[in-house]
Amino acid sequence: MQEFCAAGVCPVSALGLGAHEREWLGRLCPDAQSVLVYLFPYFAGRRPGNLSLYARGRDYHAVIRDALTPVADRLCERHPAHRFAVLADDSPLPEVRAAVLAGLGAAGQNGLLIHETYGSYVVIGTIAASLPIAAAQQRPRACLGCGACVRACPARAI
């Protein structure tokens, strides 16, 4: 798995969080205003086997934490009045929605983020921030409805 390939910002208010998600996020990052979203590509070529490609390398949770913890630490140094929390696919935060709203791709029919270069071969890491960070005006990309992810699903589960 590589270092992150893309990053963007999504305001927490745009995520439409329910009570459970807001409570959970509030415990980790009180007064969270922004979500910094990072994509980590993992496609390493096709290999035989029935184990997902992301599971064949180092645990992506550790990769995300190792990459984003220093970023969060620097943010804490520069903005000591604010809180920053690294999340690595271990929270109820809707990461795909955050990535779409941050302009990093579209949500496919399979529910995964589809990045223009890496397709669905990305994992998403985030930093929740109490610091309000202005996001570039991104228009969320819509799924093209091409059915490629449906056809590619080996279990035909979509």
Image (cartoon, rainbow, N blue to C red):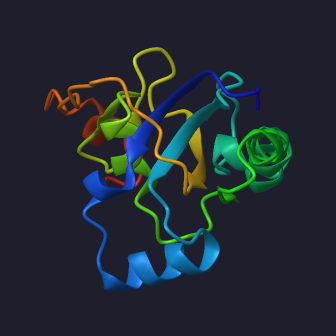
User: Considering depth in this image, is 45 or 122 the residue closer to the camera?
Assistant: 122
Does residue 53 appear left or right of residue 152 in this picture? right
Q: Depth check: give the residue in front, 79 or 138.
A: 79
* Image location of residue 148, percent across then percent down: 27, 30
Q: Quarter holding the N terminus? A: top right
Q: Position of residue 119 (x, y in %)?
A: 44, 26
Quarter of the C terminus within the rendering? bottom left
Tell me the residue at 46%/49% (across/down). Answer: 34
Q: Is residue 51 left or right of residue 76?
A: left
Q: How many marks?
A: 0
91 or 73, nearer to the observer: 73
Q: Name the residue rendered at 28%, 39% in the picture.
A: 108
Image point (71%, 24%), residue name = 44
Q: Residue 89, how many percent across, how many down?
A: 60, 59
Q: Residue sitting at 44 percent across and 55 percent down? A: 33
Q: Is residue 140 left or right of residue 94?
A: left
Q: Is residue 132 above or below residue 30?
A: above
Q: Position of residue 129 (x, y in %)?
A: 57, 53
**Vertically, is 108 above or below 50?**
above
20 or 12, which lies in front?
12
* Residue found at the far left of this picture: 145
Among the 4 quarters of the image, the one containing residue 147? top left
